[in-house]
Image (cartoon, grey):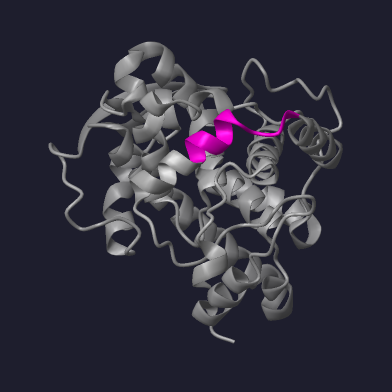
Amino acid sequence: MELETALEAASEAFTSTVGTDGIVRCPLADSPGDRAEQVIQRSKTRDRKKQRKCRESIQNRYGVRPKNLFGYIDSAKEKNVVKAVLNNSNEKISPEFLYSVAMGEGLTFYFSDYGSKASAGTAPVDGPQHIGLDEFGDDVTELQAGGYLRKDFRKGTDYTPYDWVRNEAGGEMLLHTAKFKNLNVALEAVSAELTARRDKFIADYFEMYGEDATEDLNDEQLDYWTYIYYNTRPKVRRKLLTKARFGRITEWTGDPEAGNEGSRDPVLNADIRTATAAYLRCVGVFRVDECDDTE
């Protein structure tokens, strides 16, 4: 089987996570604005009893407490935030996962930094501080060449590159990152990066385990390893994938609240992001009503 075919097969195997309502993949009849209003209404009127059951079940599954992110998408003033998530999710990167990753990588600080402008999605977004895009300046050309990011995603218009020094265990590292003009553009970049990293994971997995195992990948494995590939350097992620036989998800066995103050542990962070996406999916705030009529 060719790698491209394997990628397609793995995408088709993107089935629902245990204990959730599944990932929506269907034509959408309404505009992003109409769907955003649905998401806001679902967040505002969510079933708290169901929410508690979802949280308990998912915490037992991953060993971490999923993040409670409903307060950022439950008001009409946050419609543009929801639209940005919906606009930039796709059949590979679900809105739940995109939102979970962005918020976990620092988007909460974006809201505290910019207040009402952040809620409107109009404030600029800092790559490393708000969305974890530490090296976008190095990645943008490859993302565009690979078809992950539109060709007219322009420097000076959509993003402004700048150099940033990050403290590492071995010393300081100079990184080429960027600031983005608004939230929609920033999430477009995050989605492109996630999609590219997902495909890199699948390529590595295919090389390690072959066709049959690649076709058997499920949605939680894809979310988990996509985030590992988003959050770690190549040597680290290959090492983690080699250690985790057949893409096994490593359940966190420490304090379920360990990630509350931030963490550099890629396994803990991946568990939190994947669990939070599963939590959002279980509660159903991003579920789309039109699917039953348009599939």
Q: Position of residue 48 (x, y in %)?
A: 73, 29
Q: Nearest the camera: 122 or 202? A: 122
Looking at the rendered structure, the number of numbered marks drawn on it comes to 0
Tell me where the magenta segment starts and ends, as one range. 39-48
Residue at x 63%, y 38% (from the top left corner): 273
Q: Position of residue 145 (x, y in %)?
A: 28, 62
Placement of 245 over or under 97, stated as above or below = below
Placement of 96 over or under 150, stated as above or below = above
User: Left of 256 or right of it: where is 114?
Assistant: left
Q: Position of residue 240 (x, y in %)?
A: 70, 48
Placement of 229 over or under 101, stated as above or below = below
Q: Position of residue 131 (x, y in %)?
A: 43, 31
Residue 18 within the magenta-colored segment of the rendering:
no
Residue 88 visible? The answer is: yes
Residue 173 visible? The answer is: no
Residue 40 within the magenta-colored segment of the rendering:
yes
Residue 196 found in image quarter: bottom left
User: Left of 246 or right of it: where is 278?
Assistant: left
Q: Main secondary structure of the magenta part?
A: helix
User: Left of 289 or right of it: where is 27?
Assistant: left
Residue found at the far bottom of this picture: 1
Q: Quadrant of the N terminus?
A: bottom right
Residue at x 82%, y 35% (from the top left corner): 53
Q: Nearest the camera: 127 or 51? A: 51
Residue at x 55%, y 46% (from the top left corner): 286
Residue at x 57%, y 33% (from the top left corner): 43
Residue 246 found in image quarter: bottom right
